[in-house]
């Protein structure tokens, strides 16, 4: 069916979302999806993450975080990329024998949305990339996934606050490090 006189059944350019043009242009290959709400907001990026990965794009996740004492390197494993940003990855905790970190029953002992997301993507990432609708439970041995996806965690809970300049500097480092072409903020 032709809609609004468009040939080939597609929508005319003026009715297409600009986002589709960016995804389809071929030049935008490396994406940073950044949760802006401080916590689980980054999870709202999962449908977009899945779509982009299925289209063969490199996708990096990030989150403004309220994780307790993120600067405490004894508690939080990961690679510090800036004074206010840590690259959190399931693999880092697993290899350090801390796979059970942040699995307690009470807050704040169990609060680390970014690590929980990295764990979930490890268990389910390959299935998402393939577009499988199979079991979403996954497991930690990589049987259903095994894709280690880091989540850049920006510290919002620092005792002295997070200035715009510090946040911009940390974000710039992540974008340069990952060679990001497009940044999408989710909330």
Image (cartoon, rainbow, N blue to C red):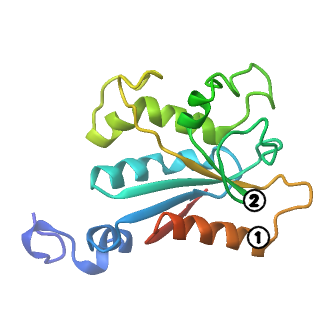
Q: In this view, does 21 lie above or below 80?
A: below
The percent position of residue 103, horizontal first and vertical second, equals 68, 23
What secondary structure is found at the residue carrying circle 1?
Answer: helix
Front residue of this view, candidates 10 and 57 = 57
Residue 56 found in image quarter: bottom left
Residue found at x 81% / y 32%: 108
Q: Is residue 77 above or below residue 172?
A: above
Residue 113 found in image quarter: top right
Please tell me which of labels 1 and 2 falls first in the chain. Answer: 2
Residue found at x 48% / y 55%: 60
Mark 1 surroundings within 10 Å by alpha-carbon count, few (fewer than 14), some (14 through 19), many (20 or more): some
The percent position of residue 52, horizontal first and vertical second, equals 35, 55
- Furthest toward the bottom, the residue is 14
Q: Mark 2 points at which residue?
A: 84
Image quarter of the N terminus: bottom left
- Furthest toward the front, the residue is 96
Front residue of this view, candidates 6 and 101 = 101
Residue 123 found in image quarter: top left
Residue found at x 27% / y 33%: 132
Distance, label 1 to label 2, CA atoms, is 7 Å
Check contact, mark 1 vs mark 2: CB within 8 A.
yes
What secondary structure is found at the residue carrying circle 2?
Answer: loop
Mark 2 surroundings within 10 Å by alpha-carbon count, few (fewer than 14), some (14 through 19), many (20 or more): many
Tell whether 76 sits left or right of 29: right
The percent position of residue 53, horizontal first and vertical second, equals 34, 51
Marking on residue 55: none
The percent position of residue 5, horizontal first and vertical second, equals 13, 78
Marking on residue 166: 1
């Amino acid at each position: 069916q032709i809609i609004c006189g468009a040939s080939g059944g597609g929508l005319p350019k003026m009715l297409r979302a600009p986002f589709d043009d960016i995804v389809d242009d071929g030049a935008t290959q490396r994406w940073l999806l950044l949760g802006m709400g401080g916590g689980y907001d980054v999870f709202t990026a999962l449908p977009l993450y899945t779509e982009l990965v299925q289209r063969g794009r490199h996708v990096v996740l990030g989150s403004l975080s309220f994780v307790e004492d993120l600067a405490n390197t004894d508690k939080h494993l990961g690679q510090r990329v800036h004074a206010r940003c840590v690259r959190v990855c399931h693999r880092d905790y697993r290899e350090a024998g801390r796979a059970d970190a942040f699995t307690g029953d009470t807050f704040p002992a169990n609060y680390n949305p970014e690590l929980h997301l990295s764990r979930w993507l490890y268990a389910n990432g390959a299935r998402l990339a393939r577009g499988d609708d199979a079991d979403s439970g996954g497991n930690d041995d990589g049987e259903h996934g095994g894709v280690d996806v880091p989540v850049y965690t920006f510290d919002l809970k620092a005792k002295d606050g997070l200035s715009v300049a510090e946040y911009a500097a940390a974000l710039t480092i992540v974008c340069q490090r990952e060679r990001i072409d497009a940044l999408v903020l989710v909330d």
